[in-house]
Amino acid sequence: MEAMRLLVTGLFLCSLAFAQTPAPAAKKKSFLDKPTLEAYVRHLFVWPSQITVTVSDPKPSSVDGLLEMAVTGSMGGASQVSNFYVSRSGEKVIQGASFDVKENPFKPNIDGLKTTFAPGYGATGAPVVVVIFSDFQCPHCKEEAKMIRANLTQTFSKEVRAYFKDFPLEQIHNWAKPAAIAGRCVYREDQAKFWDFHDWAFENQEKLTLETFRSKLEGFLVEKKIASLPVLQCFDSKATEADVTKSFAEGRALEVNSTPTIFVNGRKLAGNVSWPQLKQIIEFEVEYQKTAKNAGENCGCELTLPSVLPK
């Protein structure tokens, strides 16, 4: 009996000690943990496993008390970047953009739009700058280019300057990059003639192929009385490929993911925009800049006029 009593007492003390042992604490969830934020964003945006997700390290943001993290989703040649502002506790997150009351809301885009050496037309010193990222093989770009060329300077002869930026989507358009290289070669030879090439490439879009592009380019040069030899030498040697690559990289940095993409004083307009819509936005900017003076070519921003290129 004594042995039984001791056994029961021992079992009771062991069970009591086990009951008092604290359970391992569950790991606290935090948006500052990259896998946690990735999983949350995948659910938020319905991003399947085929989309590659990259989460940046947290860094101090322009908003007091919040950290900034960028989440990039990419698949093939397409990508999307979203900014998130995370509380220092890691428990709360805000998606969106932050603004400084002293600055133009589109200043980051204005700073990133590099128009030096880019083909341009329209009024110098204009209060509104339109920058177009385009692809010569893109059907939507063709329609947008036709609309802009027919209306922009005719309606805003003194208020707007337009610039063209190459953004060839090589994954789906096999002669878009050669066309961009050719356009830059024409621009090197004769800046004004670039716009003849621009209109010709879009007008003949359905007739151009990767195999026939060079011969048709030669015919265009002869027709427009542009020196064929230096342009074709430039084209064959891909002398302007670096210019095209740089333009494409600048577009990517501005989160350009499709063509056409237009920036009006830094305001991003992705996809096809009708002339009435574009006209309304430009009219608003013209009036706004009369007092704001924080965009356009005379604002002291990064947007600059193209310099004369050496031939």
Image (cartoon, grey):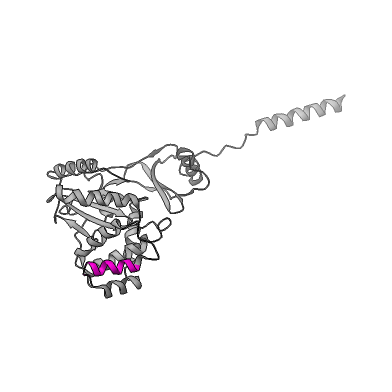
Q: Quadrant of the C terminus?
A: bottom left
Can residue 295 be seen by looking at this rendering? no
- Name the outermost residue toward the top: 1
Can residue 40 be seen by looking at this rendering? yes
Q: Nearer the viewer, residue 132 or 102?
A: 132
The image shows a total of numbered marks equal to: 0
In the rendered image, the vertical position of residue 237 relative to residue 23, given as above or below? below
Q: Nearer the viewer, residue 299 or 252?
A: 252
Extent of the magenta region: 214-226
The quadrant where residue 122 appears: bottom left
Q: Nearer the viewer, residue 296 or 145?
A: 145
* Direction from residue 270 to residue 4 in the image, left or right: right
Instruction: Name which residue lies at 52% across and 48% down.
Output: 50
* Direction from residue 185 to residue 175 in the image, left or right: right
* Direction from residue 82 to residue 308 in the image, left or right: left
- Name the outermost residue toward the right: 1
In the rendered image, the vertical position of residue 32 relative to residue 189, given as above or below? above
The quadrant where residue 185 appears: bottom left
Counting from the top left corner in percent of width and height, residue 215 is at 34, 69
Kindly report the secondary structure that dominates the magenta region of the rendered protein.
helix
Q: Is residue 92 rendered magenta in the image?
A: no
Counting from the top left corner in percent of width and height, residue 32 is at 45, 44
Counting from the top left corner in percent of width and height, residue 147 is at 24, 48
Q: Is residue 219 rendered magenta in the image?
A: yes
Counting from the top left corner in percent of width and height, residue 261 is at 31, 49
In the rendered image, the vertical position of residue 217 relative to residue 157, given as above or below? below
Instruction: Name which residue lies at 29% across and 49% down.
Output: 143
Q: Nearer the viewer, residue 290 or 207?
A: 207
Instruction: Name which residue lies at 34% across and 51% down.
Output: 139
Q: Quadrant of the N terminus?
A: top right
In the rendered image, the vertical position of residue 35 relative to residue 194, given as above or below? above
